[in-house]
Image (cartoon, rainbow, N blue to C red):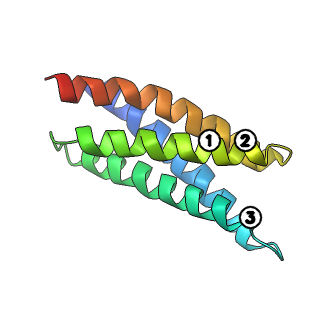
Amino acid sequence: MIIGQIDSYMKLCLQTWIFCESCIYSEISTSTPRRELVKECHDCALACFALVAKLANNQLEIGEQAFRCIIHCRQCQETCAKYAETEDIRCCGEICKRCAEQIKGIALEFNLN
């Protein structure tokens, strides 16, 4: 895989991580945080950041982590959709959807080789 592609995957995962962390912070700052939302955003943020770490270290065994990233992004997207009336949460869901769709490419590439 060429460096430009890796950089774009890393940037997208980092954006997703930032949006998820932002949602977590906003949610835990409320008087009644929605635990499901915090959990899904947390899991998604961890999965995205772990994939970035593997990509940054040029590790070849990233297929499993890429699939984890996809799964957690999809779950976060679905949870965010439940609370889409809040702009920040809606944006988080949108970036998670985009991340999951883009990471499919890297997951397939590394698992087919």
Residue 2 to residue 7: above or below: above
Judge depth for marks 3 and 2 and give the one in front.
2
Which x, y percent locates residue 54?
26, 48
Three-letter residue code for mark 1 = Gln
Which residue is at a point 13% across and 23% down the rendered structure image? 113
Numbered tag placed on residue 77 in the rendering: 1
Mark count: 3
C-alpha gap between disc 1 and disc 3: 17 Å
Which residue is at a point 64% across and 42% down the rendered structure image? 78
> In which quadrant of the rendered view does residue 92 lie?
top right
C-alpha gap between disc 3 and disc 2: 16 Å
Three-letter residue code for mark 2 = Ala
Residue 92 to residue 111: above or below: below
Q: Quadrant of the N terminus?
A: top left
* Residue 15 in sight here: no
Which x, y percent locates residue 11?
46, 39
Numbered tag placed on residue 26 in the rendering: 3
Q: Secondary structure at mark 3?
A: helix
* Residue 91 in sight here: yes
C-alpha gap between disc 2 and disc 1: 6 Å
Q: Secondary structure at mark 1?
A: helix
Which x, y percent locates residue 96?
57, 39
Judge depth for marks 1 and 3 and give the one in front.
1
User: Label 3: few (<14), some or many (≥20) within 10 Å?
Assistant: some
* In contact (CB < 8 Å): disc 2 and disc 1: yes
Three-letter residue code for mark 3 = Ser
> In which quadrant of the rendered view does residue 106 lie?
top left
Nearest to the observer: residue 79 or residue 61: 79
Numbered tag placed on residue 81 in the rendering: 2
